[in-house]
Image: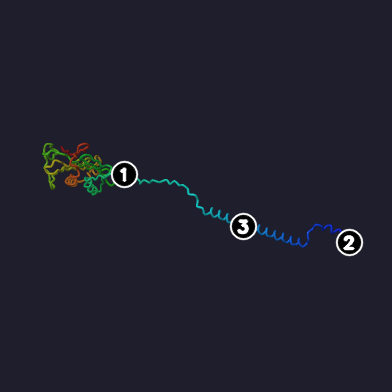
Amino acid sequence: MSGPLNRLLEHVLEGEPELGDEVDAVFRRAAKLRRRRTQAVLLAGAGTAGLIVALGYLLTATLLDPPPATMTTSTAVVTTAPSPPPAPAPTVTDRVLEVVEPLIEGRQLTVVPASQRRGDGWREYGIADDQGRARGTVQVAVFDVRKKWCFPVAAEPDACARADHAGDLEFVRYDDVSDPDRQVRQTLARRIDGNRVLAVMAAGETDAGTQRGKPGLTGAQVEQVATDDRVLAAFGKAENCDDGCPAFATPVR
């Protein structure tokens, strides 16, 4: 190096430390920077890990937390048992019809249900044939009579007819089929020395011709009904044919 150049460079390097110390300082400064970076990385990692743990905890708590209890108001449903249906009206057993109807049906006739009438001490049944045509009526009634009452004679109102007997009953038949438009078969019966008389009459349809004018029961069947203990027993002790009592061909006085 030339002399002038050396002299020039000497002034440039004035005040600078020795090169040996500067090299060590550079290495110390680099090590210090590495430590700071390492600490920063470790702190950042720790912070990140803490954040992850915190977020995981919050998420877990949110998912596992049971839903808030809701207040439910239960409305009690009161069920009332359905009201039982009204009891059917007791069926009135007609013990008179129980005797009359089998005899009517045996003659290929029928008792018309809608025609049945009854009152205090009397019963009446309309009769029809298999074609539904009217065939007259059957009437049954009970009468209270005086102790010395006797069976009447149609031709002689003041006379007494001789009665026939069936067990403890006495009876008289009054059949009149001379008029084809008004054929009647009737029997009066009572217990011997009794004070109740049972009247049974089968009358054919009026003004309907000879065939339809025939009564629904024969004379023997009318007698059978009148002398059947069940028929007289079918009437209550207080019953007496009075209000609405049907008219009989041979009245009971």
Q: Nearer the viewer, residue 183 or 167?
A: 167
Q: Nearer the viewer, residue 56 or 15?
A: 15
Cα separation, mark 2 vs mark 1, equals 147 Å
* In this view, 21 is above or below 144: below
Q: Which callout, 2 or 1, points at the residue further toward the start of the chain?
A: 2
Residue 94: x and y, percent?
A: 23, 45
Q: Which mark is residue 3?
A: 2
Q: Nearer the viewer, residue 207 or 237?
A: 237
The residue carrying mark 1 is 86
Foreground label between 3 and 1: 3
Foreground label between 2 and 1: 2
Foreground label between 3 and 2: 2
| Position of the C terminus by quadrant | top left
Amino acid type, residue under disc 2 in the picture: Gly
Determine the secondary structure under disc 2: helix
* In this view, 1 is above or below 94: below
Residue 143: x and y, percent?
A: 17, 39
Cα separation, mark 3 vs mark 1, equals 87 Å
Q: Is residue 180 left or right of residue 17?
A: left
Q: Is residue 124 left or right of residue 11?
A: left
- Mark 1 Cα within 10 Å, few/some/many (few <14, many 20+)? few
Residue 31, located in which quarter of the rendered image? bottom right
The residue carrying mark 3 is 46
Q: Which callout, 3 or 2, points at the residue further toward the start of the chain?
A: 2
